[in-house]
Image (cartoon, rainbow, N blue to C red):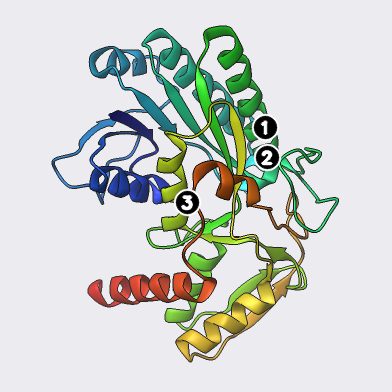
């Protein structure tokens, strides 16, 4: 099966490409950036998903499926730059959808986000719960979901929408605000102060990138027209996270508390029961296992750059 991975040069995308290749699929990377991770045997097109020339690649390659991961992913950036956020996450998705329908793609797997829910009304968020995004990023993802559903109705395009919790792991950007674990580990290894926005008691549902990539592949053959939470179904506060990092790195933690960021939710835990049943999937990595792998990755990267 030939599978386009938009955003395939990025954090989640590169891990998804790895597993696709291991499982015998034919992944093709679609990304505006050049891949630093894929080997030379994997075909890659350096192009923005908003580019109208994207249709030429669909026309030549005729993929069977698309895993659509390319996006603007920063909540704070979306608040200050809603037009660019909307262009990439909504118009870029429409461009991908139009080409899927025109060139006979059988299935699209879409990377959505817990941000579509906003502040939860119950302890563990269910897929059918109220959607009330607090950021333009969350709104753009929810809008993209609606476009996918309508395209599906009008053009009989099969889809699975995966709403990710807070994804972390190797290859995540340490400069962005979205990857708090990557940022914290990088700062710890450079003996820098960790900045915590809010009182640190806000919680997140952290899910390891390898588990997310596995869910992406499982969704290729899952039940059609489904929306699923991809999560660990475990709540961890930012203060608890720093305690884990202290235990695993044996480094002194220096913290600085600042005002909560606009658009950030207080608590988030996604119920993953439906994904476990529907995808025949479950998260295999505990937070400690995932943190250990991620710390080792950053440690090796730091010392290889010396």
Label 1 and label 2: CA atoms lie apart by 6 Å
Classify residue 22 as left or right of residue 82: left
> Residue 171: image x %, image y %?
37, 58
Residue 1 circle label: none
- Give me the residue at 75% from left, 50% from top: 125
Q: Residue at x 23, y 40 (%)?
A: 24
- Give the answer, above or below, for where 45 lies relative to 14: above
**Residue 263 in the image, given as x and y percentages of width and height:** 74, 49
Q: Quick one: SS at disc 2?
A: helix
**Of callouts 3 and 1, which one flags the residue occurring earlier in the amino acid sequence?**
1
In this view, the mark in front (2 or 3): 3
- Residue 255 x, y percent position in the rendering: 64, 81
In-front residue for pair 21/179: 21
Distance of label 2 from label 3 (alpha carbons)? 19 Å
- Which tag, 2 or 3, sits closer to the chain's start? 2
Task: Check disc 3: other Cα within 10 Å, few if <14, some if 14-19, many if 20+.
Answer: many
Which structural element holds mark 3? helix
Q: Is residue 287 left or right of residue 6?
A: right
In this view, the residue farthest toward the left is 41
Residue that mark 3 sits on = 212
Residue 88 can be seen, yes or no? no
Which secondary structure, mark 1?
A: helix
Residue position for label 2: 138
Q: Is label 1 in contact with label 2 (beta carbons under 8 Å)?
A: yes
Above-or-below relation of 274 to 221: below
Mark 2–mark 3 CB contact (< 8 Å): no
Question: Dot 1: few (<14), some (14–19), or many (≥20) neighbours within 10 Å?
Answer: many
Answer left or right for 205 relative to 288.
Answer: right
Work out which quarter of the rendered image holds the N terminus and state it.
top left
Mark 2: give few (<14), some (14-19) or many (20+) Cα within 10 Å.
many
Mark 3–mark 1 distance (CA, rounded to whole Å): 19 Å
């Amino acid at each position: 099966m030939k599978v386009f991975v938009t955003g395939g040069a990025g954090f989640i995308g590169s891990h998804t490409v790895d597993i696709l290749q291991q499982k015998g699929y034919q992944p093709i990377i679609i990304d505006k950036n050049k891949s630093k991770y894929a080997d030379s045997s994997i075909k890659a097109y350096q192009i923005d998903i908003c580019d109208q020339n994207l249709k030429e690649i669909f026309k030549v390659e005729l993929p069977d499926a698309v895993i659509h991961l390319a996006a603007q992913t920063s909540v704070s950036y979306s608040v200050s730059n809603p037009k660019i956020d909307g262009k990439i996450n909504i118009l870029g998705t429409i461009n991908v959808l139009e080409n899927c329908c025109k060139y006979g793609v059988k299935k699209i797997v879409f990377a959505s986000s817990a941000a579509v829910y906003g502040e939860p009304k119950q302890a563990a968020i269910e897929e059918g719960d109220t959607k009330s995004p607090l950021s333009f990023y969350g709104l753009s993802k929810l809008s993209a979901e609606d476009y996918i559903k309508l395209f599906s109705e009008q053009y009989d395009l099969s889809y699975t929408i995966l709403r990710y919790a807070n994804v972390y792991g190797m290859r995540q950007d340490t400069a962005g605000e979205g990857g708090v674990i990557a940022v914290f580990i990088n700062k710890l290894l450079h003996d820098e102060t960790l900045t915590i926005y809010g009182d640190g008691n806000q919680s997140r549902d952290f899910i390891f990138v390898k588990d997310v990539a596995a869910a992406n592949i499982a969704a290729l053959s899952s039940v059609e027209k489904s929306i699923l939470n991809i999560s660990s179904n475990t709540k961890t506060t930012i203060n608890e996270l720093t305690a884990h990092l202290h235990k695993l790195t044996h480094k002194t933690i220096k913290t600085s508390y600042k005002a909560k960021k606009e658009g950030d939710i207080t608590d988030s835990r996604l119920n993953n029961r439906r994904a476990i049943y529907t995808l025949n999937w479950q998260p295999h990595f505990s937070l400690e296992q995932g943190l250990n792998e991620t710390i080792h990755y950053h440690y090796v990267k730091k010392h290889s750059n010396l």
